[in-house]
Image (cartoon, rainbow, N blue to C red):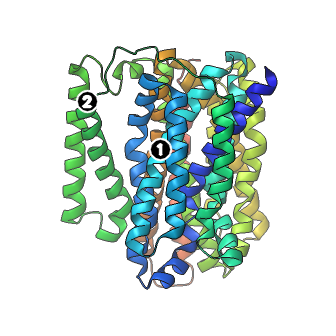
Amino acid sequence: MKHRTGLILAAVGTGTFMSALDSSVVNATLPVISEAFGNDIATIEWVVTTYLLVVSGLLLSFGRLGDLRGHKRVYVLGFGIFIIASLLCGLAPSAGALVAARAVQAVGGATLFANSAAILTTNFPPERRGRTLGLQAMMTYLGLTTGPSLGGLLTSWLGWRSIFYINLPIGLLALALSLRFIPDDRPARQAEHFDLPGAAVFIAGLTMLLLVLNQGHVWGWLSPQAIGLFMIALALLSVFVVMERRVAAPMLDLSLFGRRLFSVATASAVLNYVCLYSITFLLPFYLIQGRGLGSAQTGLILTAQPLVMAVAAPISGALSDRVGSRVLSPLGMLILAFGLALLARLDAASSIGQVIVGLAVAGLGTGIFISPNTSALMGAAPRGRQGIASGILATARNAGMALGVGLAGAIYSSVLAAAPATDTALFTAIGAAFLVASAVGFVGTGVSAIRGA
């Protein structure tokens, strides 16, 4: 039995890593792809943006489909889509074809993301949930954070198309493991139907909201385009809430948020990723533009955070199986906030050791926080709602990522524009953005502390 659950974890962990990796692996190769196709960076950026928007918009829908049709069935279908789309990405003859293939790949990625935690929660006993979800969270974050450096290495060795071809052998192996070892699950709510109108409104609203957060720094945050799209997004999401309250079988069971532990864990996850993606956005500016380091050196330094997190997450998860999340999750957020405060003190005279210490502290906080919080969120959802809970968790993560980059970018740009044109302006702007991110971390500590379990 233990051998079988280990193989289930291997199959789900691989799918989680692949779908997370492809959210970020293209970033480092954009200049190379731009040159290969003869397009400008603004056009090629849609290779990244399209994937993030499609994944984020579809997470809840595929989580709900897993509840209705079986998590294994939907998960395996997603693997097939992801593998085929990865091949199409590698063969793409133009930028437009690559963007289209990335959209299809994102459909598969959303399916994997939305059902992975549900599969683990339903196949592992509660006393092993924290450790198991800690390992899964570790794979998610390793995929997100190692993507840029891995993409750069593969591109320099084998060309940019290799970042997509590498998914084929790994994906086929994980697909075989999934088919063989993940048990077939019978949906608890076979009589319910999928809420297609609700899904369509939610996808439109969330996609518009994330598009504003992603492109606001390009359009201008107060531009008519940004404000108009933001208002439409809020209107659509408000309509979605009204619709879900009135249908017999809603896509999103809003009663889940009536459970304090579930709602607090969801809000905490959003705030955690706001903090994390402030680091992802800001530190390359500090290291490359401020300190004059190369991309390879920068990538190596940035690995300090995921390495510490990878060690801490499974340990914290195993500990949470015994003591719960009430202490561990707020403690992790508090340590993360202190790590951000350390990074806010960086200037031209700071040593690389100080950067690594700040990253390591942030990684430790993340590792302590993420496993207990994920376990608490999934444990708070009833068995028939594990898929939608998994989708909500993944949506919270992506929303936090977008908010983190948008917030850090807005503060960095505004402070840099207002500061005198001196050598210290960049460090002032980065420090201000990290201070705000640290404040978000302290707020997250307070939010996480009221979970009550």
Closer to viewer: mark 1 or mark 2: 1
Q: Residue at x 21, y 27 (%)?
A: 243
The quarter in which the N terminus is drawn is: top right
Are the residues flagged by discs 1 and 2 in contact, CB closer than 8 Å? no
The residue type indicated by label 2 comes to: Val
Left or right, 437 with respect to 10, comes to left
Residue 384: x and y, percent?
Answer: 47, 16
Residue 354 in the figure: left or right of residue 324: right
- How far from the left and from the top, in percent, is residue 365? 68, 43
Q: Is residue 411 visible?
A: no
Q: Residue 110: which numbered mark, if any? A: 1
Name which of mark 1 and mark 2 comes first in the sequence: 1
Give residue 422's position: percent from left, percent from top. 52, 84
State the residue at coordinates (25%, 63%). Answer: 222
**Alpha carbon distance from label 1 to label 2:** 22 Å
- Along the line of sight, which residue is nearer the eye, 361 or 155? 155
